[in-house]
Image: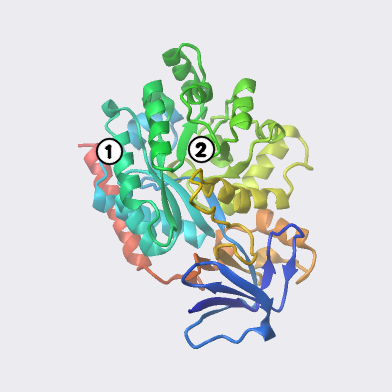
Amino acid sequence: MAKTVLTGGDILTLDEEDSILTHHCIVVDQETGLIEKIVPEDQYTAADDDTVVDCTDQVVMPGLVDMHFHSAVARGWNDFMPLKEYLEECWYPSIRALDDESCYWVALASYLEAIKSGTTHVNDMYRFVGSLAKAAQEIGIRATLCNDVALPENEIDTLDDARESITKYNDLANGRIKVRVGIEWLPLADKQMLVEARELADELHTGIHIHLNESPVEVEIVKKQSGGLGPAELAYEAGILGPDCIAAHCVHLSDREIGLMAKTHTFISHNPSSNAKLGNGIARLFEWQKAGVTVGLGHDAAECNNSRDMFEVMKFCSLIHRANLQDPTVLQAKQVLKMCCINGNIGLNYTKNKDEVPVKIGLLKEGYKGDIITLDIMNEKFIPITRGTDPEHYYSNIVFSCNGSVVRSSVIDGQLVMKDRKMTNINERQVIEKANYYFNKIKNTIHK
């Protein structure tokens, strides 16, 4: 069986000992996508059918996870509005104007930027999941997908769409593509829809991806609609919350709602730069963590962040909370990096299906999936560094100095999807041209 072999780099494992390995190679089985072994370079001789990636002068590390992601077509267009107004005037009209073809190219463009900035796994809520799955399968990214479900009168996706998507597309590409039940924000839902969403997820042995408590306006609307329950309280009453649920944002959770998140072992995607850009506030991250909630990181959407670069999200996450608390000791680089690489994978790979073995991703260890990125250590953003020692210095440079431009190569599920910043499976220029074409077509359709 052919292997993908990464050799010559400084291997940052993110394991419990924060090991850095030099003069070692990582051998990944291309059929299973699993790391077969990490051994000294002189103990492995590549076969003729192996794909060898020369990582000389590069850091080799686990790929980043974007725990809350929307494929997006309209970056930089009318991005000065508060959340509710933006959703009503731009976001919903733009996604209603999609079709299978435009969604395919929009997704390819979104996944292209994600991979080129170091992300190997996206948790994507959008429309036309078949087109998302086709794009993810072709470009090679690991993707957890879901429809953007609301009540039928909102003219986006419904639970019937979600059922069809899960039935058709879950577990494609060696299990690299998963499909969950996605729920748009709760002003476009009701309790009965939420109950039915949980029933569907349980029936089809999958998880849930939902927006909760993103803005004060959302909380106020939901309380009026539900007789005083906040969004997370309503989700709890409907049975939505649980370890198979990724709750995005959660900026305005009450004390009781934080307790419900912890009690149900619900995972939270913290999206600090999106929350800041939209003026939605600073989440109570430390109170979540103190309560025992596991937190990952997401960029949200290019429309409300303008960048899919998770290096930027990691840095902003630490800085915004340090500024808010006036405390430079919180959210050190190692903690933030592990939130992005490890916690997101734990949440997205949780399964309630007793017949399914949970996938292990996020560390460079034998038996873990080969989702791996390499960074150019000769880039000026790594000045200075003492090679092969002091993992804390590596972590600091990665989180506080780097951005996605330092990423050189990407291996996902054992397959080389980007080498020396060139994509291996798609025509980048064609993707960019098509995405620009469909943005202008959709914008003109909306303004007719």
What residue is at 72 percent from the left and 75 percent from the top? Answer: 22
The residue that label 1 is drawn on is 96
Count of numbered tags: 2
Cβ–Cβ under 8 Å for marks 2 and 1? no
Q: Residues within 10 Å of mark 1 (few under 14, many from 20)?
A: some
Residue that mark 2 sits on = 245
Q: Indicate the quadrant where residue 327 lies.
A: top right
Name the element at disc 1.
Answer: helix
Color encoding of the figure: rainbow
Left or right of 9 in this view: 131: left
Where residue 290 appears, x then y in whole percent? 72, 33
Q: Is residue 294 left or right of residue 388?
A: left
What label sits on residue 384 in the rendered view?
none
Q: Quadrant of the C terminus?
A: top left
* 343 up-or-down from 118: above or below: above
Identity of the residue furthest to the top in this view: 227
Give whichever of discs 2 and 1 has the lower sequence position. Answer: 1
Q: Is residue 192 left or right of residue 382?
A: left
Residue 357 is situated, as x and y percent measured from the top left of the image, at: 53, 54
